[in-house]
Amino acid sequence: MKKLWNDHPNFVSFVILAIGMLIILFFSARHVGFTPTQWLALAAATVALAGLSVWIMGWGDEDEENDETSADVSASH
């Protein structure tokens, strides 16, 4: 599990966030009376939102990596 996290941290974050959001969706809307098609559309939108969230959070990681790379290049010159 630790190797998977180290190799693919964004994917693992996406899966965990998507599962958590789907659980919250189910418990929040279980008494609303959605049809199966509506549940499927809500679930798909929820998973897409989780993916977008992790992707946007990953932007900060890329900036930090670029800053570290720039600092290493500057220090070597």
Image (cartoon, grey):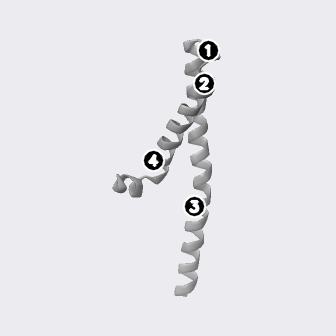
Q: Mark 4 or mark 2, which is nearer the start of the sequence?
A: 4
Label 2 crowd bin: few (<14), some (14–19), many (20+), radius 10 Å? some
- Residue that mark 2 sits on: 42
Q: What element carries label 2?
A: helix
- Residue that mark 3 sits on: 62
Dot 1 amino acid type: Phe
- Spatial CA span between label 2 and label 1: 10 Å
- Residue that mark 1 sits on: 34
Q: Nearer the viewer, residue 37 or 20?
A: 20
Which percent across, then down, holds residue 23?
53, 32
Of circles 2 and 1, the one toward us is 1
Label 4 crowd bin: few (<14), some (14–19), many (20+), radius 10 Å? some
Of circles 2 and 3, the one toward us is 2
Dot 2 amino acid type: Leu
Q: Nearer the viewer, residue 51 or 17?
A: 17
- Spatial CA span between label 3 and label 4: 17 Å
Q: Nearer the viewer, residue 41 or 68?
A: 41
- Residue that mark 4 sits on: 12
Left or right: 10, with 3 as reference point: right
- Spatial CA span between label 3 and label 1: 40 Å
Q: Quick one: quadrant of the C terminus?
A: bottom right
Q: CB of mark 3 within 8 Å of CB of mark 1?
A: no
- Spatial CA span between label 2 and label 3: 30 Å
Dot 3 amino acid type: Glu
Q: Mark 3 or mark 2, which is nearer the start of the sequence?
A: 2
Dot 4 amino acid type: Val
Of circles 3 and 1, the one toward us is 1
Of circles 3 and 4, the one toward us is 4
